[in-house]
Image (spheres, coloured by chain):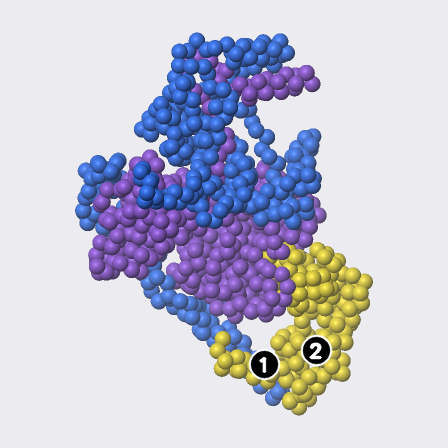
Chain colours: A purple, B yellow, C blue
Amino acid sequence: MRFQTAIGIAALVLYVLGAGWAQAQSSGPLRIEITEGVIEPLPFALPVFEAETGDAGSYAGQISQVIAADLTGTGLFREIAPSAFISGVSSFAAPIQFADWKAINAQALVTGAVSVQGNRLNVKFRLYDVFSGAEMGSGLQFTGTTDGWRRMAHKVADAVYSRITGEGGYFDSRVVYVSETGAKDSRQKRLAIMDYDGANVQYLTDSSSIVLAPRFSPDGQRVLYTSYETGFPRIYVLDVGSVQRRVLESQEGTMSFAPRFAPDGRTIVYSLSQGGNTDIYAMNINGGGVTRLTSAPSIETAPSFSPDGSQIVFESDRSGSQQLYVMPARGGEARRISFGPGRYGTPVWSPRGDLVAFTKQNAGRFHIGVMRLDGSEERLLTASFLDEGPTWAPNGRVIMFTRETQGAQGRSTLYSVDITGRNLRPVRTPEGGSDPSWSPLQP
Amino acid sequence: MKLTTKTVLLVAGLALAACTNPNSFGAGGAGGAGGVGGAVVPGSANDPTSTAYFNQTVGDRVLFAVDQSVVSDEGRVVLEGQAQWLLANTDFTAVIEGHADEQGTREYNVALGARRANAVKEYLVSRGVADNRLQTVSFGKERPIEICSSEACYAKNRRAVTVLAGGLSG
Amino acid sequence: MHKGHYISGTAHLALLGWMAFGDVFAAEPLPFQATDVSVISSAQFDALMAAQQAPQSVTEVAQPAAPEAVVDTPQPPVPDTETELVQPDPAVTPEAETPPDVSQITPLPPPADVSDQAPVLDQPSADIAVLVPEVADTPVPQAAERVAPEAVQPPDPEALPDPVEQEAVAPDAQGETLQEPSDATAPEAAATEIVTEAEQPARAPDTSLRPPARRPEAPVQTAAAAPQVPATDDAVDAAVEEAVAAAQTPAPVPQGPPLTGGEKDALRVAVSSCWNVGSLSTDALATTVVVQVSMMPDGKPVNGSIRMASSSGGSDAAARQAFEAARRAIIRCGSRGFDLPPEKYGQWQEIEMTFNPERMRIK
């Protein structure tokens, strides 16, 4: 008690007198400590990229728009409306009038130029820290075909995002998901793939049978999913480039579902139901090598590998309700990591390895949340009638998931949210969407 | 699906439903259209050997409590009837479909539906129905029959449905 | 007799066949377009751009070299074995199921032991304590796009967001001195912490498990840390006396007395209001940087003098991002001069600021 009081007094004294006390003792610099700051989107200016060739104008405009939308969409940046600009950027090579950008409080400035030769597109850009009057990193340029203009815009935005935030980018990535139409009792589902921002949707299967929970391979070239094509849930692997698919071998009288790739791209883990009991198995995707990883009378499902492939996080109701567990990749003793109230399911290991995203059900509502691998620092990011099935952006900073609305008119939509819980927003898709799986960054 | 293909499917379905052994599409009770073949039995609900009779009179489904896969007392009565019927009509096989309400994650609900389907299967087997006549499948929360988001609907969706399929003799 | 059966069987087969194959052929997966994007490495680009470094200031701008010189070797991104952009074949039906081979399900490895026990039972779980809704007596923060130390009401919609409030200045033809017209500015609306959807007021009691605030670890030791206080009463008393004496005794420094707590707080708050950690990586948010800056007598920082003295807690890259955010804070909020007493210039000619985002990380 006296000890705590003493500490309290000491803290008070230090607080009141601050470092000035120390200052008086030495003639060094004035020292202050800043522990409170603001969290707000960083204002940036992005003048429309210069069109260096006559036919590059529309590309320049569209590319500039996509870059700005990518950055704004993170919630970490705010675009300053071009109408506020004091000076434009007459050409990519022209000197930057930093004072003009400071005056409108632009903290970052992105300039760029686009040229077209035949079907070849060339995009280059520079990024400036306006208040320092310095370039951040050096200029970059991308070349490609004109029909890849969106990807080139995403690559520029990834570079800008990465340089300012220090996180890896995630814009040049895709999402495979289940596209949904129809009422709840007659819902039609088919696999679809799109850019991360909802552009370029293409369908991978028809809707003649139920498809569930597609999952990208580590190289983004293949997709595992569950289909009722045979009348029973079975796992298929589909090549994204050729749209060819094949069913994975399975035992008669069993159901297999919830597949996911190991980081090696060859091993998969999945759930297999036999005799009413669901356990986790692993197999080689090219056939054979089926290994049973759990053996309990309870439900074990939704396995997900750690990025290094050494462990698996999964859900089990062995305790009486759905909870999260971690076990070695070859099976063995499992350690429970979720202890809060309610039920926890669909764990997904983050690509950085530090967090698990999950679905939580508590008191009649669903949440998407994250926690550390030891179960600490649980944080719920969303709350709604029904949120489920998180998937990580390649940089481990953003989570996409399914939100279904209530009632007879209920409809599924994809949403994304920053792992800080900020910037919750729907991802626009032409039809309803569910079960997203985010690809790695494209090469 | 194009309109024409839909039409083809409908026509084919109706034609087949009229055949001796109602196929799995007839589970909903389209089997009452009257027999075409010579010695076939009329598949009306009054015909105790018909699918329609099984579905309507015997009862093709049992309901479950939240998160449970234990067959209730009422459910046992229904399953007792199903077992008797299946023992009497040995031409039929059945697929038992397990379902869950929407209050759960997708994967877990598939597993939960599998438990429910299996509970029904085990009961029927325990009453003497041959194991190889019964298959199970789970649809999780993918195929609700009621679509409101309240317990009234959920209770009907937490179900296992015994869907008869063509007899062994074809 | 069996005619019905034959008809039925044939029709069944036809229907099943149609279902198995017909519909599959009807599937029309859209062709894929492999995009052809090549990236030159930043090293390559640097080499090309070496001759003409990025403009450091308005006067020193070099012209970018002709970018046409850049090696233009697009690499098809799709490493498919098949040629790219092939029109996909009609989706094939799944291969005939290989007969299940039970022997492939290998016997169990060590049976998965179940451990449902919380790993730490002896420790009263912080999680549970937090469950007691904070809602009852804590005002629930309103969500706002901006999180700042102090909640700020939504501003006049006309005002541009700026931490420094300014009156709108209208051009005045009669005025002797010309002032540039400028828009009114006002601090942006702000909440005091990030409010996730799961923490919305209405939901808080039943659904929100606000994560236990990370118990602050031992304060990061920085150059600015005050001398450690011995945890005994005597030592504390001594420290108090010494501190009070130091504060009362006029400093023997010719440049004026040390800044008062209020003066230092004003500086701290001024820098804080521009220290935006919202765009920092999670790694950078775990990095404390110590930044040194030289000041001009008018209270403005010498922008070129801002340098990172040290960093702790994160990678070099994270430290760089953290430093850049700190630098922006000093330059932005110092652009009109910090409110520092001129008579004490000697005390603040050199300032060392420690930017510790620990508390921002758990907002």
The reply to whether residue A397 is visible in this rendering is yes
> Given the current orientation, which residue lies at the most extreme front position?
C174
- Mark 1 — on which chain does it sit? B
- Pinpoint residue A35: horizontal percent, then vertical percent: 50, 30
Determine whether, in the image, residue B46 is placed left or right of residue C41: right
Amino acid type, label 2:
Thr
Q: Residue at x 59, y 20 (%)?
A: A12
Query: Where is mark 2, residue-wise?
Result: B51
**SS of the residue at dot 1?**
helix
Q: Chain of mark 2?
A: B
Against C320, residue C345 (above or below) is above
Q: Residues within 10 Å of mark 1 (few under 14, many from 20)?
A: many
Q: CA distance from mark 1 to mark 2?
A: 15 Å
Q: Amino acid at mark 1?
A: Gly
Position in image of residue A243 (x %, y %): 42, 63
Number of on-image labels = 2
* Residue holding disc 1: B13
